[in-house]
Amino acid sequence: MDTDKWHRRVHGYIAPQTEVCKSSIDALGLFAKRDIPKGVVVAAWGGRILTAREIKRLPEKFQTNYALPLYPGFYIAETNEKDLDAADFINHSCDPNCVIKNLLVMVTKRKIVRGKELTADFDAGPKYGVRTMCLCGNPKCRKVVYF
C-alpha cells in the first residue's frame, strides 16, 4: 500500500517527526520517524462540523472511523476519501502512548521511540459510540470499545 500520499495535510496536522506506515492494529497508522519527547503535539484533527443526523447519512466507515464527537449531537468529521490525511490514520489503543487534549489535539504521554506507532484511546463510551470489538492487541485491551 502506498503510504506516501497520506503525508499530505488536508484538514489536520501531523508533526514532522511522524509518518504513516503499515500498522498491526489496522491497515495504516501514524509512527515516529525519530524519537519524540513526552509532551509534544503530534497531531490535530480537522474536518467538517456535522450534526448527528448528517453523520448518519455518511458511509459507515466515515461514521465510525473518521467522526469525532465534539459535543452531544455535533461531530467533526471527514466525509470522503479525498479529505483524509495522515492525522486520520491514528489508531486506538486501550493503553495508548498519547493523550487527546481539548478534543482535537494529540500529545505524547511519554517518550516515543523511533519506529513506534502513536496511539490514543478513542473510546467514546456507550452513550455516544457504536459497540466495536477492539483490535489494539495490547495486554490491557478492554476487548470492546465504543467508537
Image (cartoon, rainbow, N blue to C red):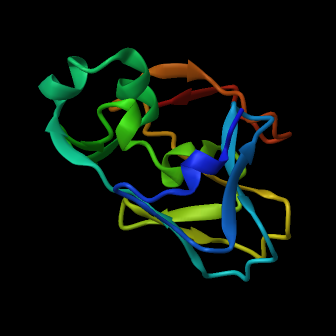
Q: What residue lies at 38% left-to-right and 37% top-to-bottom? A: 82
Q: Is residue 36 above or below residue 63?
A: below
Where in the figure is residue 119, as x and y percent of width and height?
A: 66, 53
Say which of 133 and 34 sits in front.
Answer: 34
Image quadrant holding the N terminus, namely top right
Where in the figure is residue 11, as x and y percent of width and height?
A: 34, 56
**Residue 145 visible in the shown view:** yes
> Residue 114 vs residue 124: left or right?
right
Say which of 11 and 129 sits in front.
Answer: 11
Where in the figure is residue 32, as x and y percent of width and height?
A: 75, 65
> Residue 86 vs residue 67: left or right?
right
Q: Is residue 118 above or below residue 54?
A: below
Q: Is residue 48 above or below residue 55?
A: below
Q: Quadrant of residue 126?
A: top left
**Numbered-mark total:** 0
**Residue 93 visible in the shown view:** no
Where in the figure is residue 8, as x and y percent of width and height?
A: 49, 57
Q: Is residue 4 above or below residue 73?
A: below
Q: What residue lies at 23% left-to-right and 19% top-to-bottom? A: 56
Say which of 76 and 98 sits in front.
Answer: 76
